[in-house]
Amino acid sequence: MEVSEFLKLFRLKKREIIISAHAQKRLVERTIRKQDIVSYLNKSEPVAVQEQEQDEPNLRVFRIYYRQSAKYFHTYIISINSKILLKSAWRTSKPLQKALSKGAFKFN
């Protein structure tokens, strides 16, 4: 999915951002601050977005990559329906960071 298409869907209407119990646990383990994630989701443009297959008809799930700094990226898994649910978050792997920073990462 193109980033612009994702942003249009994401910003279509104001939705509450909820962080799942799993994501809260992972954020503590990975020392990622909740307020940073909410800020990225609301104010930043991702560098890449991948929509994931879903069986539930009114639910869309995305893997989103945000630039954290000049050489680091965060990956978020969110679902969108009447609300936005953060399912997980982590820092990307070194090979993926290199591919994203060079613009060489493409989704099929």
Image (tube, rainbow, N blue to C red):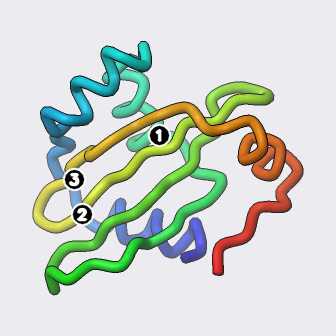
Question: CB of mark 3 within 8 Å of CB of mark 1?
Answer: no
Residue 43: give its label: 1
Count of numbered marks: 3
Asked which quadrant contains residue 19, the reply is top left
Tell me the residue that label 3 is attached to. Answer: 84
Question: CB of mark 2 within 8 Å of CB of mark 3?
Answer: yes
Q: Position of residue 52 (x, y in %)?
A: 40, 72
Query: Is residue 99 depicted above or below 12 in this figure?
Result: above
Question: CB of mark 1 within 8 Å of CB of mark 2?
Answer: no
Tell me the mark number nearer the camera, choosing from 1 and 2: 2
The residue at 26%/46% (across/down) is 87
Tell me the kind of residue under disc 3. Ile
Tell me the kind of residue under disc 2. Ile
Query: Is residue 86 depicted above or below 104 in this figure?
Result: above
Camera-nearest residue between 53 and 10: 53
Q: Earlier in the sequence, mark 1 or mark 2?
A: 1
Q: Secondary structure at mark 3?
A: strand
- Quadrant where the C terminus sits is bottom right
Q: Could you tell me how far apart the alpha carbons at marks 1 and 2 are, in whole angstroms?
A: 17 Å
Residue 80: give its label: 2
Q: Could you tell me how far apart the alpha carbons at marks 2 and 3 are, in whole angstroms?
A: 5 Å
Tell me the kind of residue under disc 1. Lys
Asked which quadrant contains residue 81, the reply is bottom left
Camera-nearest residue between 32 and 10: 32
The residue at 83%/57% (across/down) is 103
